[in-house]
Amino acid sequence: MSVSSPVVVLDIGASKVHCLVGETEPSGDCKILGMGTSPCRGIRRSAVIDMPRVVESIRSAVAEAERAAGLKITGAYAGIAGQDVQAHSSRSAVAISGSSEPIDERDVERALAAAEQAAPPAQAVALHRFVQSYAVDGEPVQNPLWLHGHKLEVETLSATASEHACTTLRRAAEEAGVGIVGFLVESVATATAMLNTDEREMGVGLLDMGAGTCDLALYHGSLQHLAEIPFGGQDITRDLSMVLNISPREAEQLKCEHGGVCIEEDEADEALTFRTTAGRSHTILREQLDAIIEARQQEILEFVGREIERSGHGHQLAAGLVFTGGAAQLRNVDRLGEEVLGLPVRIGQPSEMIAPDAVQGPACATGIGLLRFASDSTTELAPTLDSTGGNRPRLLDRVARIFSFL
């Protein structure tokens, strides 16, 4: 097995833009060749509110990744998430000619092709399709190959994104000198790096706890449900800023360095010092700091619990939930999650990656997932890298693929 061509991905989030360059090793591991990160202040929740700032953040992150990888980046996959991403189910059926012959690969391909023709909702682009189930003559089967019947049915789940969101992100990247090769749903991509096959078969949820929003993906065999939770790490920072009368920057630092939930008794009385916006030095107990953080985290998790209940798939999550994203780094958030949701929770760590320690944690999970997902793609792509500074790749309007974890 030869080493694949390098692949570039962009994670354009509410707090930072992350650009990663990687390739698949003969061992199957994904090796990071270069990365770049730039703060981003042009996105609120998942919507672009300041295009020039987003463009500059992309340009800066890409330039840093180019220097690290020693390659000129001309194209990339871009992650997309938030309220612009939806999931829609569809069914299709094809007749099997001649019941004396078993169902073969061509019959399955026809059924999948018919499912792929299902039109996405107006103003939406289908990015991924997942096989939910097969049936032969009305009887559910796990794999229809070599079975006999007259009719093959397939149910799929499509992950779509709004055309407006895709167009906006494409324009921002192009202004920064990068062509978008394709869009990938971030929670779907992150799952490839964070969830193993056993967890997906048992039933598992992935909660990507980002700065602006949290994205929830539920799996049972294949993807079953996608949802956005309209709160994130920036809400915790905003709470601290308002309650303690400190700048957002100092609130973020206080949260990252000292914040957590479910504190230990021996830590409760630890005094933490900070400076208010009036310039005065002030002291707060760690217990008080964590109480502010925990109140918002509990609200987010209760929102997650209601969404899981609404989805109808809560009883299928035998493997519990996997938390990832920057807000998942707060101390003991997994313990709070188990208390609020009544499910086992673990903090996700990327697997099968050859990467610096700086990107091994949950904060970089989305970028790692996008890179892993794109590297594993079997879709033929235009070149994304050009060491001689050649022309940009042809842009693809959509990436529509069929996946099955059955």
Image (cartoon, helix red, strand yellow):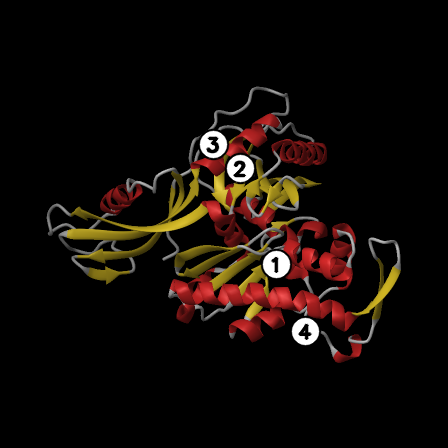
Q: Residue 266 vs residue 335: left or right?
A: right
Q: Which residue is mark 2?
A: 77
Task: Tell me what residue is drawn at x 30 percent, y 57 percent.
Answer: 133
Q: Amino acid at mark 3?
A: Leu
Alpha carbon separation for disc pair 4 and 3:
47 Å
Of badges 4 and 3, nearer the viewer stands 4
Task: Tell me what residue is drawn at x 64 percent, y 42 percent.
Answer: 18
Task: Check if mark 4's residue and mark 2's residue have beta carbons within 8 Å.
Answer: no
- Going from N to C along the chain, the mark reached first, 3 or 2, is 2
Residue 47: quadrant of the picture: top right
The furthest residue to the front: 278
* Label 1 neighbour load within 10 Å: few <14, some 14-19, many 20+: some
Of badges 2 and 1, nearer the viewer stands 2
Q: Residue 221, image x and y in percent?
A: 39, 60
- Going from N to C along the chain, the mark reached first, 1 or 4, is 4
Q: Which mark is residue 349?
A: 1
Q: Which mark is residue 262?
A: 4
Of badges 1 and 4, nearer the viewer stands 4
Alpha carbon separation for disc pair 2 and 1:
22 Å
* Label 4 neighbour load within 10 Å: few <14, some 14-19, many 20+: some
Alpha carbon separation for disc pair 1 and 4:
22 Å
Q: Residue 284 vs residue 73: left or right?
A: right
Q: Which residue is mark 3?
A: 381
Q: Quadrant of the C terminus?
A: bottom left
